[in-house]
Image: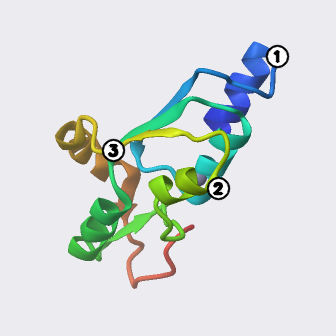
Amino acid sequence: MEAIRAAAERTGSRYLTGAYLLTTLEPCPMCTAAAIWAKMRGVVFGVTQLDARQWAAEHPDRTFTWRQIGIRARDVARAGHPRLDVHEEVCREECLELFPLTARHAPVGGGAKSG
Ligand SMILES: [Zn+2]
């Protein structure tokens, strides 16, 4: 959302026709919908929601800022108009290496995950 908003401000248009949203993690349904409404050309990402869930399950000692409603970007795109190009798992291995940087160790004694 922030990248789309910043791009719209920079270009002086709410429409980003022809632009692609490039992200490490699969965009959430809200951001994918925002890309559709901005008439973007597509989204490109490395780490899927499934990868993120797997990573979270393997790292219960970490907190995350990327919790998502489990609707895949491809499914939001399929329902949207204009139709976004969705390119999944682009540079996936490199994005998986970056992914731990988005998490931090949970506070001592547990605590709620941030959202
Ligand atoms: Zn989002």
Tell me, yes or no, if residue 1 can be seen here. no
> Does residue 56 appear to the left or right of 39 in the view shown?
left
| Residue 74 to residue 64: above or below | above
Q: Which residue is mark 2?
A: 30
Residue visible at 54% across and 70% down? 69
Coordinates of residue 86 in the picture (x, y in percent): 43, 41
Q: Which residue is mark 1?
A: 12
Query: Identity of the amino acid at label 1?
Result: Gly
Local SS, label 1: loop
Quarter of the image where one finds residue 55: bottom left
Quadrant of the image containing the C terminus: bottom right
Residue visible at 72% across and 34% down? 38
Coordinates of residue 39 in the picture (x, y in percent): 69, 32
Q: Earlier in the sequence, mark 3 or mark 2?
A: 2
> Does residue 86 appear to the left or right of 97 in the view shown?
right
> Does residue 112 appear to the left or right of 31 in the view shown?
left
Q: Which residue is mark 3?
A: 88
Observer-side mark, 1 or 3, equals 3
Local SS, label 3: loop
